[in-house]
Image: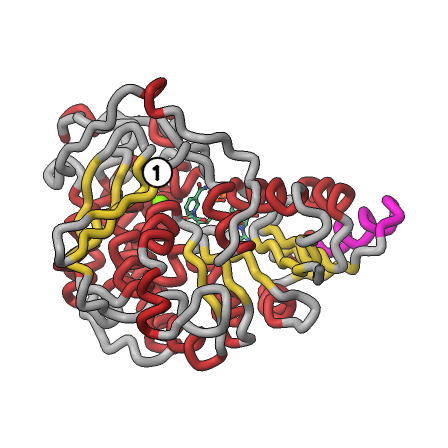
Amino acid sequence: MTVQNVAVLGATGSIGASALDVISRHPDALRASVLAAGSNVEALLALCGRHRPDHAVIADEAGFAALRDGLHDAGLPTQAHAGADALATLAADAGCDTVVAAIVGAAGLDSTLAAAAAGKRLLLANKESLVLAGELLMAAADANGATIVPIDSEHNAIFQCLPAAHAQTGHLAGTHGRCLPAAREDVRRIVLTASGGPFRGWTRERLTAVTPAQAVAHPKWSMGPKISVDSATLMNKGLEVIEAHHLFGLPGTQIDVLVHPQSLVHSLVEFVDGSTLAQLGLPDMRTALAIGFAWPQRIASGVGGLDLLAHGRLDFEAPDLDAFPCLRLAYAALETGGTAPAILNAANEIAVSAFLQGQIGFLSIPALVEDALTALPSAPADSLNALREADLRARQHATSALPHHAQRV
Ligand code: NAD
Ligand code: MG
């Protein structure tokens, strides 16, 4: 058996930990050859000690000396690197077969694009790169034979529910080519499930006083702080609608959202004949990662089976777009097209970061995003430069608007 060399980008995060857990269960088939993190050198060194990769990258260049010396002092064979360029170079390097794109935010775009352009198997958790540059990313994967397996649980569920499509079109997942064919005529719609987050059922009025600690305490999933806040505002589901549009080639009108508080049904595909296929399982990202590593085969992930009798019931309700306008804003940005999704994503990143630092209130997140979308015109998203420009302008716009939203403490 040949060993799959895996670059885990965002290794110190929540998805990174789940990926390394699955990798360590299959020492004959999987090996972490690159580990990369943002700025936490200590955590990266600890992972290097455990997984002994060929390369370790710290994106924050100030951490280089500590990483290099730490690796040396621990007697590890791992080579130290720093900076965003090193991340992209190693993601494309011939030394790895597979890239787990698990950096949070637009910071993950360059390395994700580099992996796609190098024709890697790409386990794509970094949804922001699809929201920001979906057309370019999918085109790079298509042109260079990269296999994208969506790791976001909803998209991974849809990926699992659609395999018949590959036989029809000759696009086999697990071989080269786009993971899923565009705009299947036999799919009526897809339904993304949403847990509803910690504030499901709350009124706008009640949401004004929400604290960062409350917002990151997700009822079902254990995740990094940014996506936890996105889940609480429903922006996460909005980003996922745009993500699904790019992955599966469907318009927003064929992508619906259903709140399902138990988070056991991960998403559904409805076909023209009235059949609906769903994928179910415990809320644990290791299932999706195992699919990513092994598809079209299946391997153990460490996740137990689903005891529906013990869970008892599955509930569904419509999302509340008045209390959680971020979902509506994301649909609108998708409809507008061009650079609007990039503007939405960038303004949201600024707003979430300010909220987590206690600078603004919870309801200022959708307000800042809406303000950026209204103020900045959408341009064609035909080049990386145009997208970067839109991303930068939206960050500047949202940052300059922060004082108007400053919290009185
Ligand atoms: P996290 O905050 O736990 O981890 C983020 C990782 O990115 C860390 O390793 C951090 O060091 C690294 N990082 C941060 N800034 C960086 C930079 N500038 N350059 C390089 N590395 C940087 O986040 P997470 O929950 O693991 O989420 C990661 C991605 O996966 C996000 O895009 C998120 O939307 C997506 N995702 C996560 C989950 C989940 O269950 N956690 C589910 C679906 C999708
Ligand atoms: Mg998700």
Q: Position of residue 150 (x, y in %)?
A: 41, 56
Magenta stretch: give its range. 64-76
Residue 361 visible in this rendered orientation of the protein? no
Vertical placement of residue 232 versus 123, above or below:
above
Q: How many marks?
A: 1
Left or right of residue 322: residue 71: right
Image quadrant holding the N terminus, namely: bottom right
Left or right of residue 75: residue 345: left
Q: Quadrant of ligand 2?
A: top left
Vertical placement of residue 405 versus 119, above or below:
above
The 10 Å Cα crowd at callout 1, few under 14, some 14 to 19, many 20 or more, is some
- Residue at (70% x, 43% y) in the render: 47
Residue position marked by numbered label 1 in the rendering: 280
Residue 298 visible in this rendered orientation of the protein? yes
Q: Position of residue 372 (x, y in %)?
A: 22, 58
Q: Position of residue 237 (x, y in %)?
A: 27, 46
